[in-house]
Amino acid sequence: MSRNWFRLEKYHANPIIAPHESNRWENFSVCNPAACYENNKFYLLYRAAGNDEAHKIHFGLAVSRDGCRFERISPEPVLSPSADGPDAGCVEDPRIVKFGEYFYITYAYRPLPPGRYWLQENSSAFMPEEPAEAPFFYRNNVTQSGLIISKDLKTFHRLGRLTHPADDNRDVIIFPEKDN
């Protein structure tokens, strides 16, 4: 059995993408990207957030010919939390595979913005005053995993939740090869 080994080296000009001061939706943080290579280009679908109290989280898209120097495709997010759906608080942590002409992207989401959790502030500040009968994931702003599809990584169709509503789970991927 032959093994092909390769050596990874840290890019000297890291980070390859950083917060963009003039874009309010991504002026605080960019992180946790999903990357893919298609038509001689590298695509980076990344998580981004502005410096707002609610800490709404969006997806941006950047493209590169060499995999090191990325340019944003738009000053606006390519995907934002929905206006009133289960992912109205944030969309984050994408993972991409491609089958046929579609990109399948798993992602984490919350029904409400998470707030400034890194400051250990009261992240329940954005929790609604709902009756005890409201679904558990909503009452507790539980992280869920969902699936979206896209042909161009600029427009998306939300297909829904992949995990059980009581599970706080963001670790879902689709393997890049079909099995049977």
Image: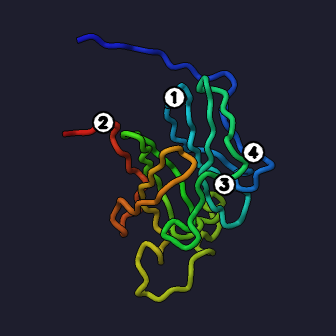
Disc on res. 49 = 3
Give, as a three-letter code, the residue at label 4: His
Observer-nearest of 89 and 126: 89
Q: CA distance from mark 2 to mark 1?
A: 19 Å
Q: Residue 91, image x and y in percent?
A: 54, 58
Q: What's the residue at 41%, 55% (across, down)?
A: 147
Helix, strand or loop under label 2: loop
Q: Which residue is under mark 2? A: 177
Density class for disc 2 (Cα within 10 Å; few <14, some 14-19, many ≥20) is few
The x and y percentages for residue 95 are: 45, 44
Upstream in the sequence, badge 3 or badge 2?
3
- Residue at mark 1: 39
User: Tag 1, which secondary structure?
Assistant: loop
Mark 4 or mark 1, which has the lower sequence index?
Answer: 4
Quadrant, the C terminus: top left
Residue type marked 2 = Glu
In the visual, does 104 lie left or right of 153?
left
Q: CA distance from mark 4 to mark 2?
A: 35 Å
Mark nearest the camera among 2 and 1 is: 1
